[in-house]
Amino acid sequence: MKLYEGIKGESYLVREVMVADRLTRRLEALGVNEKTKITIMNKKKSGSLIVKVRGTRLALGRGIAEGIEIQPLDGREGTAQ
């Protein structure tokens, strides 16, 4: 599922980052890599998110969040309710 489909307050593992190379490098520098735990702290109706990665809070727009594939920490696949 895509990051923007996640549930506020839940934690996930990043499966894949599928954005432009330049943006991928920036996200990696901020700690958003494959197999990294990411927690959704807040969601806005516009699709923007506040996430917590490695102890740091980041604001991500929906366009970026659409390019980040996640999975639940327990490894199950599915979509948010």
Image: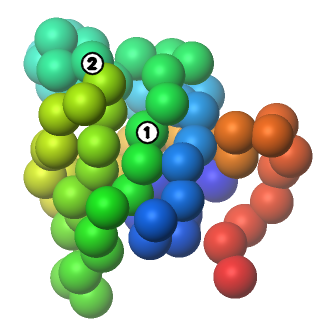
Q: Which mark is residue 49?
A: none
- Above or below — where is 2 with respect to 24? below
Where does residue 37 sit, x and y in percent of width and height?
49, 30
Q: Secondary structure at mark 2?
A: loop
Question: Mark 2 is on which residue type?
Answer: Gly
Q: Residue furthest front?
A: 55
User: Is residue 66 among the parts visible in the rendering?
Assistant: no
| CA separation in Å, label 1 and label 2 | 10 Å
Q: Nearer the viewer, residue 24 or 48?
A: 48
Where residue 53 sits in the image (x, y, percent)? 31, 33
Residue at 82 percent across and 37 percent down: it is 75
* Marks 1,2: beta carbons within 8 A: no
Q: Which residue is mark 2?
A: 31
User: What label sits on residue 38 in the rendered view?
Assistant: 1
Q: Which image quadrant is residue 81 in?
A: bottom right
Q: Amino acid at mark 1?
A: Ile
Is residue 23 positioned above or below 28 on the image? below
What percent of the width, then of the height, locates residue 30?
Answer: 17, 20
